[in-house]
Image (tube, helix red, strand yellow):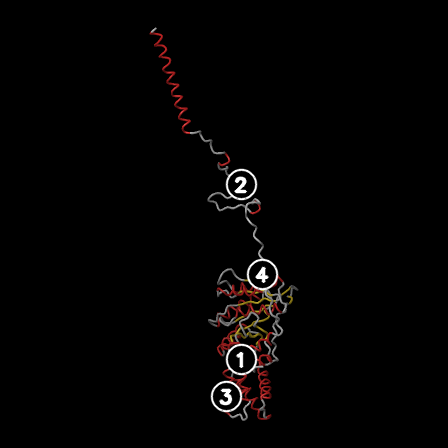
Amino acid sequence: MNDTLDLLLAIGLPTLAVLGTAVALVARRRSSGPTLPSAPADTAPAPTGTAPAPTGTTPGSTATLPEDVLAPDAGVAEAPPTPAPTLEVPEPVVGRMARLRGRLARSGSPLGARLLAVLSRDHLSEDDWDELEETLLLADVGAGPTGELIDALRRQVRVDGVREPAAVRALLREQLITLVDPALDRTLATAPGLGEDGLHRPAVVLVVGVNGTGKTTTVGKLARVLVADGRTVVLGAADTFRAAAADQLETWGARVGVPTVRSDRDGADPAAVAFDAVRSGRETGADVVLVDTAGRLQNKAGLMDELGKITRVITREAPLTEVLLVLDATTGQNGLNQARVFAEVAGVTGIVLTKLDGTAKGGIVIAVQRELGVPVKLIGLGEGPDDLAPFDAADFVDGLLGD
């Protein structure tokens, strides 16, 4: 009996121990929750070279979905098309000078009024003639033209005995128009032509002058004159030394739909920019290329080298048809000194006089023509975009005399 009991204990105790261990393991698993499955296979990195990069945006990524694969309900609104800029229509060229003539008469210039007041006196003494001469010199007419005008007036007054205001004005007008010289050719050479190869060549106008004369603004206004006259224009921003010059010129051109060729960096070679502008004008069939140049006047040698290079490079693509010198009328005789240097260096063919509305020195027109032997072709009498007009001798004199 005892032997049987010992046998049962020997077998049962180990069995109970095994069962207890199993129960404990089950209980422990239930208290810790179910085991999570492993990560899906598609989140593992793809083998190199076996799959394209994902197109969706992931956390921390800057990539975005292409517009053509966005879902219709993605909430991304299509951007509206950018409207084309409204182009300005420049004022017609015909009649501009007549409008500006009135502005010149109202600008406060005392030249015409003083001359008429003296000539209308009953008896002209030597002091009166001295006063006339002084008035003309102060108006920058110049010594030579002043002497000629005084001599002509003395002769007419003595012979004809002119005293009536209307007759005095007619006499003075006639003499001033003679000095301004209406016989000078003031047309702008802006007609395109054909090269020796029979291909299109635009007219090329080089604009020169010192800084501060309104040179770049004048180029922009001249573009408007040409557009109003039915010409197609390309602008060349070859003033690469003044940071704002190209931006300023581009703004002027954009207002009337005229393209601007410019460099993408300051200090670029001006001749290279000018060449690109002329080539662009030739390839696009433009009528005129206007090239704005730097206004530096440090020394004659440097200016000669730079303008000479620009001219040589330009003429490889098209002939240079005009060289316009922009002068500030308020500078008087100083402007003449600048003009002499540019005339020697650049072969000036015409003058653009700016800021005549703010000066009593309208006689600079006579002096600069006499000094340089080239005509004033354009005149500026205001800050408006269309306040630039082809010069007319009779209209200009009438403005000086207050007509």
Residue located beneath label 1 in the image: 362
Looking at the rendering, in which quadrant would you find the N terminus?
Answer: top left
Which residue is painted at 50% across and 44% down in the image?
A: 57
SS label for mark 2: loop
Task: Please state which amino acid type lies under the numbered disc 4.
Answer: Pro
The answer to whether the residues at label 3 and label 2 have Cβ atoms under 8 Å apart is no
Q: Position of residue 374 (x, y in %)?
A: 57, 77
Task: Please state which amino acid type lies under the numbered disc 1.
Answer: Gly
Of callouts 3 and 2, the N-terminal one: 2
* Observer-nearest of 282 and 2: 2
Of callouts 1 and 2, the N-terminal one: 2
Of callouts 1 and 4, the N-terminal one: 4
Looking at the rendering, in which quadrant would you find the C terminus?
Answer: bottom right
Residue located beneath label 4 in the image: 85
* Observer-nearest of 204 and 331: 331
The answer to whether the residues at label 3 and label 1 have Cβ atoms under 8 Å apart is no
SS label for mark 3: helix
The answer to whether the residues at label 1 and label 4 have Cβ atoms under 8 Å apart is no
Residue located beneath label 3 in the image: 131
Q: Quadrant of residue 285?
A: bottom right
**Outermost residue to the top:** 1
Q: CA distance from mark 3 to mark 2?
A: 93 Å
Task: Please state which amino acid type lies under the numbered disc 3.
Answer: Glu
